[in-house]
């Protein structure tokens, strides 16, 4: 539809059909983004549950004694962190898939929780990796002998759980970037004001 002005010029306004097509395209893009984000949140849930189950079942008895994940504080922390991660991933996926308007409080909530979960899982993987290193290599300065030679099965399962935990960290790093973008893209860019010249008075000698 074209509205002509008195000066003979024309101002083109969007037709209802064009507006409907644009709305449909935006809705399709939003649906695709919600689906992608939901999958990104469900995959870490499966990974956290897998790492959790492997570590929970990790115990071994040999002629040298018995060893369980509960004997080491780092592995207990890994189990708790993966449990929290699995629960949050499921709840956030349910919220993300719901077709509703995404408000600023929602954006800030996802931003802080995604950041917090990323550091929580990263810390669990880092602490557990240090314990595994000592279990494989030992440390003669503190008279800590290598134990994986005696409890090989235990160390293999613990290693698998830690590796899966670090894969989860990679997914949560992507989710943190996504939630950061969804939050800060709602703010307008700062206005670039033209710099005013500063006049410096000239003093004559």
Image (cartoon, helix red, strand yellow):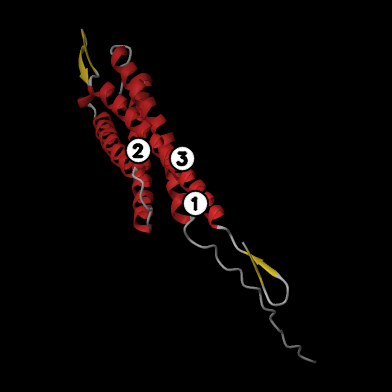
Read off the residue under disc 3.
32
Residue drawn at point x = 72 percent, y = 77 percent: 7
Residue 42 placed where, x, y %? 35, 33
Q: Position of residue 132 (x, y in %)?
A: 34, 24
The numbered disc on residue 23 is 1
What element does badge 2 sit on? helix
- Within 10 Å of the Cα at label 1, are there few (<14), some (14-19), or many (20+) other Cα atoms? few
Image quadrant containing the C terminus: bottom right
Q: Which label's residue is closer to the chain start, 3 or 2?
A: 3
Question: Which mark is drawn over residue 123?
Answer: 2
Quadrant of residue 131 within the rendered picture? top left
* 3D distance between C-alphas at marks 1 and 3: 14 Å
Regarding mark 1 in the picture, which secondary structure is present there?
helix
Q: Residue at x 26, y 30 (%)?
A: 79
Query: Measured from the top left, where is residue 102 in percent x and y?
Result: 38, 53
Q: Pointers 1 and 2 in contact (CB under 8 A)?
A: no
Q: Is residue 161 above or below residue 170?
A: above
For disc 2, the neighbor class at 10 Å (few under 14, some 14 to 19, many from 20) is some
Q: How far, Cα to Cα, is label 1 from label 2?
A: 44 Å
In front: 71, or 88? 88
């Amino acid at each position: 539809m074209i509205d002509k002005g008195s000066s003979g010029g024309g101002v083109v306004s969007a037709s209802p059909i064009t507006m409907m097509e644009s709305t449909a395209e935006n809705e399709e893009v939003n649906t695709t983004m919600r689906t992608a984000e939901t999958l990104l949140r469900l995959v870490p849930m499966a990974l956290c549950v897998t790492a959790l189950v492997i570590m929970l079942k990790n115990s071994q008895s040999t002629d040298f004694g018995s060893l369980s994940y509960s004997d080491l504080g780092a592995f207990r922390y890994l189990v708790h962190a993966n449990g929290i991660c699995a629960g949050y991933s499921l709840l956030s996926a349910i919220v993300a898939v719901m077709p509703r308007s995404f408000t600023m409080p929602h954006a800030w909530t996802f931003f802080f929780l995604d950041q917090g979960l990323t550091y929580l899982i990263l810390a669990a993987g880092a602490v557990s990796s240090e314990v595994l290193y000592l279990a494989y290599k030992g440390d003669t300065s503190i008279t800590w002998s290598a134990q994986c030679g005696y409890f090989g099965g235990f160390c293999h399962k613990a290693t698998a759980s830690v590796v899966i935990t670090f894969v989860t960290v990679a997914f949560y790093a992507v989710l943190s970037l996504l939630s950061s973008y969804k939050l800060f893209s709602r703010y307008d860019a700062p206005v670039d004001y033209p710099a005013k010249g500063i006049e410096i008075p000239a003093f004559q000698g």
